[in-house]
Every structure is written in structure tokens, then in C-alpha cells.
């Protein structure tokens, strides 16, 4: 299957600082990338959908000014958690769908465990 | 209303036995896809198997098979010959043609394989 690389895998930051998480499709072009948040022992909750070259579409209840998403190229999307607070501590995971046919599934990055202290 | 229901929060199976993880879904879209993903403790989501709504035959991938019963709106995952490495969270997901590209995930089932 196709490979999606997410970096960093773990990050600890201080309250009030910003953290950037990168999601790269390594061997395919991803026209659409998704960002999810997962609380412990819970399912994945879609935060936003980003399409290359256009603004991200955020799910209801997700603050777009707090979770900045940029999909600058067909292989890279970034999520920036701005002015992070302890309640933003969570597991964030991206996924990407390949352009064209043959890949109905989405491919996921390894996830980023964010801890805000 | 929940679009994906997984009624088994936790399941145990003996090594080498088969296990079925339940998934029911709700959609009015005639075109949709159903997926199963495995999430080990490390966190990554591993794609296991896919079933399209128009597929006539049940999907199979190695030890994984999907028992697709369209009229009942169920898409159960069957794992044959369980291995210790199968212990993980398993998520059923759906993507609907008319509702964009995003996936909706069920709450998950934690599978524990006993030696």
C-alpha cells in the first residue's frame, strides 16, 4: 500500500506555544488529506478535510483559528495547534487519499501524540 | 444517530481460533464503501479490508474476510486462525459517495488474543 509519513510522532510543548505536525504522502499524490483527533480509548474524530490549494473544511465544533491546516502541495499537509493548552493534549492522526482509481482506502500516518504541559 | 455501530467493546479469542467482530451501519446513500482498520497500541491505523456496496462477493484478504449482508446493513470482520499479534483495536468505517471523501469510524472493538 501507499505510505503516509507523519512527523513528529511525539511532542511535548509548553502551554501557550504552537506546534506544527506534518503529514506527507511519500509515493503518491494526495488530493485530499484528513486530520483526526483521538482521545484515549475512543474512536477517531474528523477535525478537518483539506484539499490541495484550497482552504480546509472544518467539522462543526473545531476552531479553525486554533487548528490551522495548510495543504500546500499534493504531498504535504500541515496541522498547527496554536497557543496550545493542556486540553489540546491528544493523539492526532492524518490520512490521505490517492488521486485516481485503485485506492478506495485512505492511508494513515503514524500519528502524533501531543502533550501540553 | 450513529452511522457505524460496533456493539462489542472488547472481545477475547484463543490463539488459532477464528473470531467475528460485528459492525452495522446506517446510510441512505446507494453507493458507499466499508472498511476495517486495525490500530495496535503504537497508534498507527492499518488498513485490513474493503467492501464496496455494489460488490457481489464478500471481500477477503488473507486471514481477513468481510461478511457483508447488505439487507441487514452489516459488515462483520472475520479473522481466521488468530495470532497474538492480532491483539489491537479494530475500527469499522464507512465512506459515502454523496457525503464527500471523509470516513466515519465506529467506536471500535478491542480484541485480545489469548495464548
Image (cartoon, coloured by chain):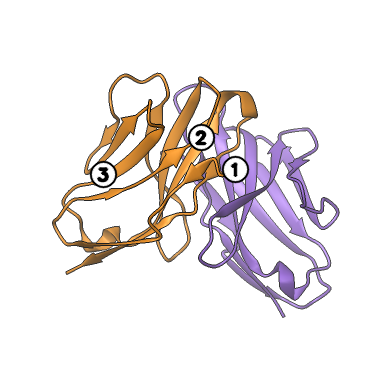
> Residue A67 occupies which quadrant of the picture?
bottom right
Instruction: Provide the chain ID for the residue under circle 2.
Output: B
Which chain corresponds to the colour orange?
A: B
Instruction: Provide the chain ID for the residue under circle 1.
Output: B
Q: Residues within 10 Å of mark 1 (few under 14, many from 20)?
A: few
Residue that numbered label 3 is attached to? B78
User: What colour do you see for chain A?
Assistant: purple
Label 3 to label 2: alpha-carbon separation? 20 Å
Disc with the residue nearer the chain's start (3 vs 2): 2
The answer to whether any part of residue A75 appears in the image is: no
Disc with the residue nearer the chain's start (1 vs 2): 1
- For image coordinates 63% across by 66% down, the residue present is A90
In this rendering, position of residue B67 left or right of residue A8: left
Give the numbered dot on residue B26.
2
The answer to whether any part of residue B106 appears in the image is: yes
- For image coordinates 55% across by 35% down, the residue present is A97
- For image coordinates 47% across by 35% down, the residue present is A105
Give the numbered dot on residue B1.
1
Disc with the residue nearer the chain's start (1 vs 3): 1
Query: Residue A41: percent from the left, percent from the top?
Result: 50, 65
Label 1 to label 3: alpha-carbon separation? 26 Å
> Circles 1 and 2: CB distance less than 8 Å?
yes
Label 1 to label 2: alpha-carbon separation? 9 Å
Q: Secondary structure at mark 2?
A: loop
> Residue B23 occupies which quadrant of the picture?
top left
- In the image, is residue A69 above or below residue A11? above
Query: Residue B88: percent from the left, percent from the top?
Result: 36, 61
Amino acid at each position: 500500500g501507499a505510505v503516509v509519513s507523519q512527523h513528529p510522532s511525539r511532542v511535548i510543548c509548553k502551554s501557550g506555544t504552537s506546534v506544527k505536525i506534518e503529514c506527507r504522502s511519500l509515493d503518491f499524490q494526495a488530493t485530499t488529506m484528513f486530520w483526526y483527533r483521538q482521545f484515549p480509548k475512543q474512536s477517531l474524530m474528523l477535525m478537518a478535510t483539506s484539499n490541495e490549494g484550497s482552504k480546509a473544511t472544518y467539522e462543526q465544533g473545531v476552531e479553525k483559528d486554533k487548528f490551522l491546516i495548510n495543504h500546500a502541495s499534493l504531498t504535504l499537509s500541515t496541522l498547527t495547534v496554536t497557543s496550545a493548552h493542556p486540553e489540546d493534549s491528544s493523539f492526532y492522526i492524518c490520512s490521505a487519499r490517492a488521486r485516481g482509481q485503485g485506492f478506495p482506502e485512505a492511508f494513515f500516518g503514524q500519528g502524533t501524540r501531543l502533550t501540553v504541559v | 444517530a450513529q452511522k457505524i455501530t460496533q456493539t462489542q467493546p472488547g472481545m477475547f479469542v484463543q490463539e488459532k481460533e477464528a473470531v467475528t467482530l460485528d459492525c452495522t451501519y446506517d446510510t441512505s446513500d446507494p453507493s458507499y464503501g466499508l472498511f476495517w482498520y486495525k490500530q495496535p497500541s503504537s497508534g498507527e491505523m492499518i488498513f485490513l479490508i474493503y467492501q464496496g456496496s455494489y460488490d457481489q462477493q464478500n471481500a477477503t484478504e488473507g486471514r481477513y474476510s468481510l461478511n457483508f449482508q447488505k439487507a441487514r446493513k452489516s459488515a462483520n470482520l472475520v479473522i481466521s486462525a488468530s495470532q497474538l499479534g492480532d491483539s489491537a483495536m479494530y475500527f469499522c468505517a464507512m465512506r459515502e459517495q454523496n457525503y464527500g471523501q471523509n470516513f466515519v469510524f465506529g467506536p471500535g472493538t478491542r480484541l485480545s488474543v489469548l495464548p
